[in-house]
Image (spheres, grey):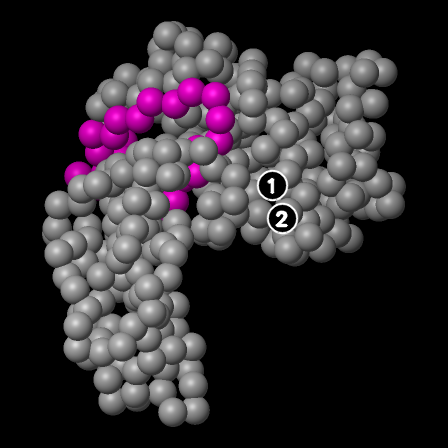
Amino acid sequence: MEISIKGLSKKYKGNKYGLKNFDLELKNGILGLIGPNGAGKSTLMRILATISKPSEGLITFNGIDIVKSPDNVRKVLGYLPQDFGIYPNLTAVEFLIYMAAIKGYTGKGIKMRIEALLEELNLIDVRDRPIGTYSGGMKQRIGIAQVLLGDPKLLILDEPTVGLDPEERVRFRNMLMELSGERIVILSSHIVSDIETIANDVAIVYQGRLLEHNSQSTVLKTVENQVYETILTNEEFDSFRMQYTISNSMRKNDGWAVRFTLNDGEKMTERPVQPVTGTLEDAYLRAILSAKRGEKYEN
């Protein structure tokens, strides 16, 4: 399967853009979509899910224009928006049977599918409780279950791990990795470690524009030999963070332990530092801060 996005823009009132001149090519596998709040991630996902229409540009799914022929996508789509609706008085089983019927799935097969999903998402023991009594994480898992009902070939998931505890996040990540072989999975998350664990490709979005789209290994090369740790005094900390991209800091009794990234061409010579392996979070922060500074972001 293939998705091709060319020159995509979404314009709102007041000459404001949610997306602007966005190009992206996707094939089977998991794409991790990362960017700050308001970057355009949800706008992109809503357009791909055929809920919203672009102002300009072309999107094709397996060569077919999704704006002109939205059913081509909808029949293979599983979409989980950041805020999804539930029926609090229905049990998990009742809700999933209802959602399956809306999607056109009925019969014994779908009931077996529901039982399997409840088991896989660790909801089998609460299957007959009203959803309104569930915790936030449990409700999120119900949302994930309804997305997977029809074994979709295109999965679009907007912040799916919000509210999940670490064990549930691991279970969900493993499930996605098992599903991704013959599917396109688009996953947006503020938890960069989730994306780093499972995504083949990464797209970094800022102010409606695509800063970077590449394999995760290629994105990580942007911070190769550029990430360090050092110790700062309290007096040094403020001026240091104005000069370098700090991805993590920890307060010590006598100062700060910081993890930071050098800018292109910089060398650290004035203080003792310890080189460390760069992470996707380091690469992401470097890309965003470079964009904020108005610098041209390049590999």
Q: Residues within 10 Å of mark 2 (few under 14, many from 20)?
A: some
Residue 283 appears at what percent x and percent y? 32, 51
Residue type highlighted by circle 2: Arg
Q: Is residue 46 above or below residue 105?
A: below
Q: Are marks 2 and 1 in contact (CB under 8 Å)?
A: yes
Residue 100 appears at what percent x and percent y? 71, 23
Residue type highlighted by circle 1: Arg
Please tell me whether residue 14 belongs to the stretch shown in magenta.
yes
Question: To which residue does mark 1 refer?
Answer: 173
Q: Residue at x 56, y 22 (%)?
A: 181
Instruction: Judge by depth and name the residue closer to the eye, 144 or 258.
Output: 258
Label annotation for residue 156:
none
Secondary element at image label 2: helix
Q: Residue at x 16, y 54 (%)?
A: 264
Where's the C terminus, which quadrant?
A: top left
Question: To which residue does mark 2 refer?
Answer: 169
Please tell me whether residue 49 belongs to the stretch shown in magenta.
no
Residue interval drawn in magenta: 10-35
* Cα–Cα gap, marks 2 and 1: 6 Å
Secondary element at image label 1: helix
Q: Residue at x 80, y 30 (%)?
A: 116
